[in-house]
Every structure is written in C-alpha cells, then in structure tokens.
Image: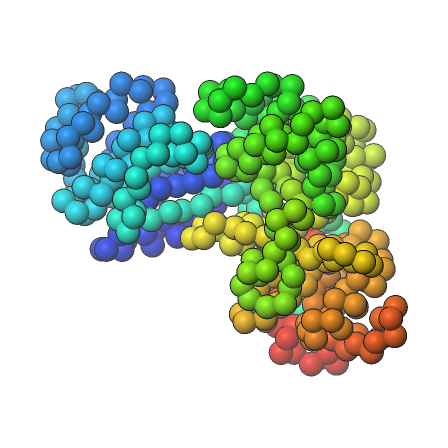
Amino acid sequence: MIRSVAHKLDQWLKNPNRKPMVLRGARQVGKTWLVRDLAKRHDLQLIEMNLERFPSQADLFSENRPEAVLKNIEAELSTPVRRESALLFLDEIQAAPELFAKLRWFREDMPDLPVIAAGSLLDFALNKYQYSMPVGRITYFYLEPMSFLEFVQASGHDALYRKLSSVSLASGIATSLHEKCLKLYQAYCLTGGMPEVVQQWINTENLDECIKIQHDLLTTYRDDFHKYGGEMEAAALNKIMLSVARQLGNKFMYSRVDPSSKAGPIRKAFRLLCQAKVCSKVAHSTGNGLPLGAESNEKFFKALMVDIGLISVQLGISSTRRREAANLTLSNKGGLAEQFVGQQLRALKSPLTEASLFYWQRTGGRQGEIDYLLQYGTRVVPLEVKSGPAGSMKSLHQFMAEKRLDFAVRCNFNLPTVENIQVKTTLGQAVSYRLLSIPVYLAGCLDRLMEEAKNVPVDNI
C-alpha cells in the first residue's frame, strides 16, 4: 500500500539539516510499516529496536555519546552499522521515555545518521515520567489512518484515484464515477483506514474478517490503558468509547457515558483516550476570527474516534446485512458522515502539524450549530455536512449573516456545484455568499477545490 505522506519522509531524509524524528499517532495506524518502507525504498540498513518487546535494550543508550551507543548496538545485534547508509529506528519508545533526552546527542554529534523514534502512547509516558524533551533538536511527524483517497488507491482503483486527485469543478465527475465513489465510500465507512483492516479487505473482501481485526484493535486500546494509563476499569473504557460513537455529531456530554458514575473519572479517562489518539476533540470556536481557538468555550466540544471503521463496528453497523449497512452509511445516522469528513480533514493537516478541528455552536438563546470551521488562508470558512439531497441550512445562513462571511462549504452525497446564495435568515436578515457543495468523498481535496471555487465564475461551472 502507498501512503501519501511517504514523500514527506523522503524530504526529511534528504534534508542535510534534518533532526531526529519522532513519529506520532494511534496504535496500528502504520507507523512501523512506514519506516520500514522508507528504509526499503532508499536501500538503507534498518537498525530496528522495539523497546516494548525488548525493554532491556534501553540500556544500550546509557551513555550520551552516539559513537558508544552504536558500538553497543553492534555488539547486541552482532552486525556492523554502516552510518553512511543506515537508519536507526527506535520503535515503541514510550516504553523507555528516558531515551527522548538522548536524541539530542544524535542531532549534535552524529547528524549524518538518520534517527526515527515512534510510539503510540507518548503522552502517557511523558506525563507519567516527566522527562524533558530535547526542544529544538527533534521534529515531529503525525500519522493518521489511511484517508479515503489512499483507500481507493490501495483497493486497486489507480485510475479513479488519479481522477479524484486532480478533479476540478470545471470538468466535474461523471455520474457513473460518482456512484462508484459512493460505493467505495460505503465500504470505507465499514472497513475504515486502519492499514491491517484495509489489507484484509483488499485480500478477501470478507467483512467478518475485518470486524475481527477491528475488535482486536479495540481490545488492544483497552489493554494499553491498563498498562500505561493507570487503574482504569475495562468496563468504563468500553462505555466511553461506545458513547463517543453514539454521540457523534452532537455536543459530547460526560453524563451520557454513564449516568450512574461521577463526571470526574469519566473526564479523566476521556482525556487519556485523546492523549492516546484513540479519540479527539472538535473544539468549540466563536468563529469571530483567527486563530479559531482564540475564543472558545471549553464546556462545548464534540468527539471523534480515530477511525470510522471502529465507529461502525461499535454501533453494530458492520454486523448488519451488507445492503442495510450500506444504507446506514448514506443516512448520516449517528453523525457517521461527520466522522468521515472530520477524519479526512485530520489527514489533510498531517503529517507536519497535529490536527486540530473546530466547530461552532450557539452557547445561549436560540439553537444553532456549524459542523466544522476551517481556516482558509486568513479567512474563516464554515463547513456543513448534510446527508440528504438538500437539507436545512438555516444555521449556516444565520452564521454567514452574523459573521459577515462570503464563502462556505457543504459536504453531501451529490455531484459538485458552486452557487451564489441570496436568501433571508429566519430573523429577516438578507445574506449573500458563495457556496461550494462537494460529495463527502472529495473532502480530502478540499483545499484545492476551495481555491478553484473562490476564483471561477459561477456561470462557468
């Protein structure tokens, strides 16, 4: 499988001023595979050390001199290390967090040796052990699950992948291709973007086998909590992850997780789930300007899971009959389309920055909500996710009027369009703005399509 972020790793490797890299992301999103693939493609000697599987190997780094460390590694592995053509990979580094401080010496004393550290639970380890990070001497690289476009390519639809990657509003999408993309969208909603599950689907198209792997992943996440997150009951973790799935698309409320439990422990467990990248917050924003997080109400947020496939298996969608499951993915039931779009937006922001998503909700008086707020250059752009062919846009009209914005995005299941909206809000305010509507499966192309929609006259679309 080809990961679109691989070229960013290539750029890092070729940079003469590179720093040791810390590769971050939830467990099983493909970090180890990505590093092995990098070494293979560049014909590098991969020196891989899994510190969770072999914790005693951390002692090889006891000295602060990289030369001495390499001699220890050579003795341990009984193989010479060719610095000029090697790649040192410290996998599951959260099992030995004291090694973070050692990375600085490779940056300062051995810059010619590329070094990558990876871990799934780095925040757990760093919060627990309070080791200082070598600020300015390492770089971070954030990895998300496979995006929908990566899924399309991995599934063998290379020509369709190329079409979607270069699609323009002017050329549009043929109806037959649109229907094909919707079917692939339905499959992605059930399988998700976890590489092992995607590979199983490619090999067999057996959804039952995919479900088994997904349940194993959820079990792994719960085991990680017990190992790194302190005393936390498995039953409580199950309730929190299931509640995230059930509350998709709505303000997340701790009281809905378990009405019989106190909010404090649930709040703590949810925070740890976010640190482990199993869940993520969609933070509230007033939408008054940039940065989006400048004015926020911390009591208001929505929650996403790392992967839509894990959502579907928890909600039981994957276990229904194939046709019924497909219908559910198109109904936006439980905010599934919102999870999909959020997941693609997170993938768009990676790998060089950690993804942060925002939404707007009126915090008093009349109801009103915008599913996502985007930063587009120096502008705030609202994005609505609609499941039906049209759907009410009262909140969007009101938001555009109040914030005096002139451009918005809607994701639905229809062909792309651009139109100039001229309406009155429910309060009688006149509002005029340009609306870009795209099918949800093009969410990963949003940056390019927004640029085109902003500049192309509507009559030419």
Report which quarter residue 238 is drawn in. top right
Report the side of 424 relative to 412 (left or right).
right
Q: How is the image coloured?
A: rainbow
Could you tell me which residue is drawn at 54 percent across and 26 percent down?
221
Image quadrant for the C terminus? Answer: bottom right
Q: Which of 432 and 79 lies nearest the eye of the viewer?
A: 432
Could you tell me which residue is drawn at 83 percent across and 63 percent down?
394
Report which quarter residue 402 is drawn in. bottom right
Judge whether 189 appears above or below 175 on screen. above
Report which quarter residue 374 is drawn in. bottom right
Could you tell me which residue is drawn at 66 percent across and 31 percent down?
263
Residue 375 visible in the displayed image: yes
Q: Position of residue 45 (x, y in %)?
A: 24, 35
Report the side of 226 relative to 445 (left or right).
left
Q: Position of residue 88 (x, y in %)?
A: 26, 36
Judge whether 432 appears above or below 410 on screen. below
Could you tell me which residue is drawn at 36 percent across and 26 percent down?
95
Q: Which of 300 and 173 lies nearest the eye of the viewer?
A: 300
Residue 46 visible in the displayed image: no
Q: Position of residue 358 (x, y in %)?
A: 62, 54
Report the side of 250 relative to 101 (left or right).
right
Q: Position of residue 67 (x, y in %)?
A: 11, 35
Q: Which of 165 and 289 lies nearest the eye of the viewer?
A: 289
Judge whether 175 appears above or below 420 on screen. above
Number of numbered discs visible in the structure rendering = 0
